[in-house]
Image: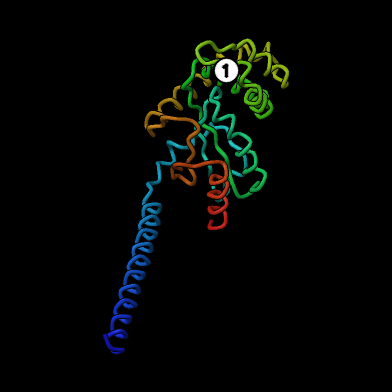
Amino acid sequence: MNRRTLLLGASTLGLAAFAGGAYVLTQRRAAEAEAEAAAAATPTEDQALLVRDYSPSFGPADAPVTLVEFFDPSCEACRAYHPVVQEIRRQFPTQVRVVLRYTVFHEGSDEAVRILEAARMQDKFEPVLDALLEQQPGWAVHGSPEMDVAWEIAGAAGLDLKKAETDQFFPGITGILNQDAADVEALAIRQTPTFFLNGKRLENFNADSLIADVRFAVENS
C-alpha cells in the first residue's frame, strides 16, 4: 500500500467520523427542539377551572405568575411540598400568586377542609393550615382519621373551636367543596399535589424543579 492510498484511507475515515459526529449532533439538536416544542405545546387549561373567586390565595392578585396547587390536607406528599411552596412565596413575594384548591381524596379530608374554611372565616387560615400539615401524622391516619385530634390542633393554632364547630356547616363551605370536586373531575386530577404554572400542568416535578420552573416563569414574565 503506497503513501497516497494511506492518505486517501485516512481522509475517508476522517470524513466518516465527521459525518457521524455531525449526524449525532443534528439528532441531539432535533431531540432538544422536539422537547422544547412539546413543552410549548402543553395545553393551557381554562382559567375558570383553575382559579375560583373564593379560592384561598397568597400574593398579589395581579402577580405575573400564578401557581395553582390542588392539594389534599391528608396527603403526605402535600405535606412534604408545603415548605417548598412556602419557599416560593418567600423568594417571589410580589411576582407569584399561589392559589390553593381542595382535592379531597382521603377519608376525613372533607372535614379538614371545613376546619380550614372555618379558620378562614376567623382570619386564621394560614396558621391552622400550617399546624394541620405539620402535625398531619397525628390525625390523618388513612382509613381511620382522628378528626378530634385535627380540631385540637386547629384550636391550639388559634381557632375559636366553639364558633368553628357551627361555621363548618355554613352552606358556602359546602358549595366550595362541591365546586372544587367538580373542577377536580373536569381537569382529570388524579393525584395530589398537582400543580399548574400559569395555566399549564407540571409533570414529573420535584422540589428543585418546581422552584426552578417558577423562577423561569418569573424571569420571563
- Residue 102 pos. (x, y %): 51, 27
Q: Quadrant of the N terminus?
A: bottom left
Question: Disc 1 residue type?
Answer: Ala
Q: Nearer the viewer, residue 138 or 103?
A: 138
Report the residue at 58% width, 35% height from top: 81
Report the residue at 35% width, 67% height from top: 26
Extreme residue in the front direction: 1
- Residue 16 pos. (x, y %): 30, 74
Q: How many marks?
A: 1
Residue 86 horizontal side relative to residue 22, left or right: right
Residue 51 horizontal side relative to residue 187, left or right: right
Which color scheme does this rendered protein use? rainbow
Q: Quadrant of residue 30?
A: bottom left
Q: Quadrant of residue 115?
A: top right
Residue 66 horizontal side relative to residue 157, left or right: left
Relative to 15, say whether 175 is above or below: above
Q: Quadrant of residue 145?
A: top right
Report the residue at 52% width, 19% height from top: 109
Q: Secondary structure at mark 1?
A: loop
Q: Residues within 10 Å of mark 1 (few under 14, many from 20)?
A: many
- Residue 195 pos. (x, y %): 49, 39
Relative to 12, say whether 132 is above or below: above
Report the residue at 54% width, 33% height from top: 100
Residue on which the image places disc 1: 140
- Residue 54 pos. (x, y %): 53, 31
Q: Nearer the viewer, residue 134 or 122?
A: 134
Residue 30 horizontal side relative to residue 80, left or right: left
